[in-house]
Amino acid sequence: MKIKPQHVILTIVIIIALFIVAIWSLLQGPRIILKKSFGGIDEDLGEHIQLTPDGGYLLLGETKSAPSTARDVYIIKTDMNSNVEWENTYGLEKFNRASFSQSTSDGGYIIAVQGASEEDTSSGTTIHLLKINSAGEEEWTNDYEEGRKNSTDEAHYLLPTPDGGYAIFGKSSALGANGWGFAAVMIKTDADGKKLWHKIYDGERHDVIYSAQPAADGGYMLFGTTRSFKASGQDIYVVKTDADGNNEWQKIYGGAGEDSCVSSQPTADGGYVLFGTSKGVDSPDMYLLKIDAKGNKVWERFYGGAKEDTGSSVKATEDGGFILVGTTESYLLNHTDLQLALLKIVDFIPALKKPLGRFLVTPTVTRLDKDIYVVKTDADGDVEWEMSIHNNGDDIGKSVVQDSNGDYVILGTTNADKATKPDMLLVKVKASASLFRFLRRSSGEGT
């Protein structure tokens, strides 16, 4: 049978069209699918987001907007489409800031709060636990003044414990070795928030715990910062404890400048990733450090541009990698998947580096505003994609989760209209299959 030329042409056109659609699909990088702000006429700041059992989100922060008369804890419960189901404010003292939350076995939530009797915190701050039910109604509160009267005590992280109670992590202005500064602290409570014991991890100066993870032996891994172990500058501080909070070992990580860990995640091999900011002789960069279960350094990665880039939150992702969120003043224009694919090709064929060079550079633009900075990495901390989120003002990234749809949901603060006060900001990012990830897998890298 003779094939008609028009059929050949049609077949070729269909094949080319399918090829273009396939390549276009592969080249689609991350994209914003939702931006939503929350708040009133005064300051409303986003601090922490968690997934809720029904697939929605619990948003934590602080507010000065009515009906608040001071600075109150601000909590919003949304469904999976970010529609508000309820919102509430909680005024434990004149100054109140929620830092972290966990779901409880009865369907409610436990919230770590720092409060002060004066809005400017001049009288010091106190650690609180706030228990609410699934509808946001307050059930009880407890406070823990672990240092001197009018000391600075802060709660930064919270874990449920096997006995049904809670472990609170932060800092306290307890008397240190030199009679000043503040120490890292762990407070253990029962299920009703009544204090059972506390432990101090005290160097000679300023030590803080910002994050913690359960250890395989029933103890805890504590992650934070310290200024106690060198003449100047700040280091990352890791403490391994037993189940009763006793210090089993501690390690310090850092260079000559300022290094911090404010977020952490366990890894599939029994180790941990520590996330924060590192500043050497140049401007600060977002910093990801991998350690094993014994605290030995495995690798480290830096992310950012020519200006200041700071890390706030890390979460493990479904594909075994990590999603990182922070704030950038570099305004790194995003690597496209095509650029990342070309970088991979150059790895295989170095001779192509020169002719392809102009396509491989991601320019940096100096801006006056801050942007939310998002980086997706593989299991080894290598960049799969990165993006910045800009709203015509200062935008601060504070916390991130991956939801049941595989989307990345980011909470922070925006001051899009600088004539008004900042609002809590929720952003959803969808990451499509990328050519770069396809090339990584086809070359035997990644999973």
Image (cartoon, helix red, strand yellow):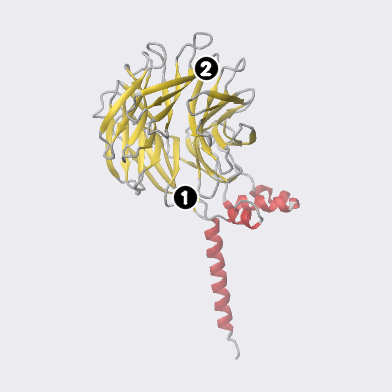
x and y percentages locating residue 396 in the rendered image: 44, 34
Residue 367 in view (yes/no): no
Q: Which disc, if any, is residue 298?
A: none
Q: Residue 274: name its quadrant.
A: top right
Q: Residue at x 54, y 68 (%)?
A: 18
The residue labelled by disc 2 is 202
How far across and down, in percent of the image, does residue 215 sit?
A: 52, 34
**Residue position marked by numbered label 1 in the rendering:** 31
Q: Could you say where residue 280 lies in the image, as x and y percent from the top left?
A: 62, 26
Of the residues tagged 2 and 1, which is closer to the observer? 2
Q: Quadrant of residue 53?
A: top left
- The percent position of residue 27, horizontal first and vertical second, equals 55, 56
Name the residue at 66% across, 56% down: 443
Q: Is residue 198 visible?
A: yes
- Residue at 70% from the left image edge and 51% from the top image edge: 346
| Of callouts 2 and 1, the N-terminal one | 1
Q: Amino acid at mark 2?
A: Asp
Q: Quadrant of the N terminus?
A: bottom right
Residue type of the residue flagged with mark 1: Arg
Judged left or right of residue 444, residue 206 is: left
Along the line of sight, which residue is nearer the eye, 210 or 266? 266
- Compared to 236, does 393 lie above or below? below
Decide: few, some or many residues near mark 2? Use Cα within 10 Å; few <14, some 14-19, many ≥20: many
334 or 174: which is nearer to us? 174
> What kind of element bears circle 2?
loop
Q: In the displayed image of the protein, which residue is found farthest to the left?
A: 67
Give the answer, above or below, for where 184 lies relative to 61. above
Name the one closer to the observer, 210 or 308.
210
- Residue nearest the observer in this picture, 32 or 53: 53
SS for dot 1 = strand
